[in-house]
Image: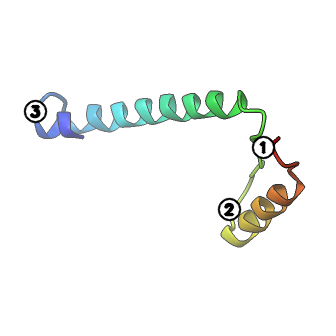
Amino acid sequence: MIAHLEGQYDRDEAVEQVKIRTRRFARGQETWFRNMDESRVIERSGEWDIDVAADEILQAGQDLQPLE
């Protein structure tokens, strides 16, 4: 959005660039976490409920074996 404010992109192009860069960043995070042995994926689909997600995260943490 800074590029838009500086006149480098019109608003629509700036929004599109934010979307592209956000997707790239998210893919990079997925790759980084996938390569960590101690990370776990908690699948989410449908409507997201913070209380359900928190319970799943806490349960996943309890299921982990301590690192040696």
Q: Which mark is residue 7?
A: 3
SS assignment at label 1: loop
* Mark 3 closeness class: few <14, some 14–19, many ≥20 residues within 10 Å: few
At horizontal 69% and vertical 67% (from top left) the residue drawn is: 49
On the image, the x and y values in percent for residue 14 come to: 27, 35
Residue at the outermost front position = 68
Q: Distance between the residues labelled 3 and 1?
A: 42 Å
List the residue tagged with mark 2.
48
Label located before the other in sequence (2 or 1): 1
Secondary structure found at label 2 = loop
Left or right of 56 in this view: 24: left
For image coordinates 80% across by 57% down, the residue present is 61
Q: In which quarter of the image is the C terminus?
A: top right
Q: Mark 1 points at which residue?
A: 40
Q: Residue at x 84, y 49 (%)?
A: 66
Q: Which residue lies furthest to the bottom in this view?
A: 51
**Marks 3 and 2 close (CB-CB < 8 Å):** no
